[in-house]
Image: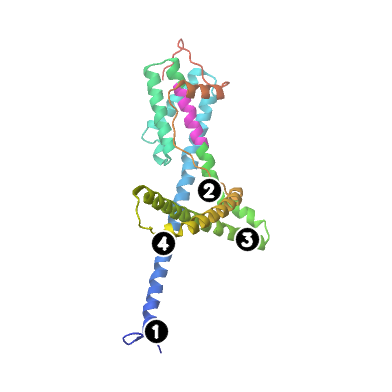
Amino acid sequence: MTELAEGYTMKDLIPLVSAIVVVLGWFITYFLNRSQKLHDIFLTKTEMNLKDVCGPMFSEMEVIFEEKHHESQMRGLARFIKKLEGATSPLFLESNKQIIAQSSALKGAYTEYKNQPSKETHDFLWSSFLALQESFSSKIKEYRALLYKHYDWKYRIDRLNPVLQLLCECFRVFFVTITGFTMVAGGISLFTLCEVVSKKIFLVDDPGILIPYQVYIYVYTILIFVIWLFATGLNHLLIGYRIENIWIVKKEEKAMSWYKKTYANKFPVYNDSNQETD
């Protein structure tokens, strides 16, 4: 039996290898279970936001905006603002920064209108109201897409024969893998480019770490990127992806004019001779 080091043999290392495998298996199982629990909590929170926050508040805002009687509309708006500010505000359950920011902007616009009623503050109030309503609508679509994404995927592949089901699942694994490789390759290429630029700027004779292999790095990066683009095109047909930035409507004529034009038939008209009371 081959000796490894000062009397130790392969047979002596078997217990050590077994212990390492057991420990690694325990860590992998722990992190997988933890990841699954976090994912379940995330889905539960998303479902709660959809059912208890975004859905009911969006419906209430629709009722307020569709109200034709001016005083009834303003009373409904006052109740809605009071709900946002109350101790049982649904916003305490909301985690989306866009909705929280726009809700705060709406409360500020309402306070400003009550203190200084004018056409400008009136239009700003309803522009802020519509911006929040659109934020709710957008998040409702995102939450539904998230909650039912796997349902739709499961529904699609279950209608296929077993061979195509296997191919679809393999494609998803491939897409996740090639996405990771693309990020790594992009980072290595960027680091190589930084080395080249720094060498030219500081006139350093040191060849660097990656500069000798820069041709291979760029070629393989481009190749991986092309494959990723192809995979992304296929993946987009199955899942889709979109990133939204946080924004709030500002008291600017351009922004308010957009809402007044978009909702021309429904946008409330300011009448300084008919001031309402709470």
Q: Give the mark toward the camera: 2 or 4.
A: 4
Report if residue 76 is visible in the image.
no
Give the Cα distance between marks 2 and 4. Answer: 23 Å
- Picture residue at 48% right of the left edge, 13% below the top: 271
Return the residue at label 4: 31
Q: Which residue is mark 2?
A: 147
Task: Name which residue type carries label 3.
Answer: Leu
Q: Secondary structure at mark 3?
A: helix
Report the span colored magenta. Answer: 124-137
Say whether residue 72 is magenta.
no
Locate residue 49, reporting x and y percent: 46, 42
Which badge, 3 or 1, is on the more N-terminal residue?
A: 1
Q: Quadrant of residue 95?
A: top left
Label located before the other in sequence (2 or 3): 2
Using residue 175 as the reference point, say whether residue 203 is left or right of it.
left
Please identify the residue farthest to the left as the structure is shown.
Answer: 6
Quadrant in the picture for the C terminus: top left
Ranked by sequence position, the earlier of labels 1 and 4 is 1
Q: Marks 4 and 3, how far apart in space?
A: 28 Å
Question: Please, which colouring scheme is shown?
Answer: rainbow
- On the image, the x and y values in percent for residue 139 come to 50, 39
Disc 4 or 3, which lies upstream in sequence?
4
Majority SS type along the magenta span: helix
Nearer to us of marks 3 and 1 is: 1
Q: Are marks 2 and 3 in contact (CB under 8 Å)?
A: no
Q: Residue at x 53, y 28 (%)?
A: 63
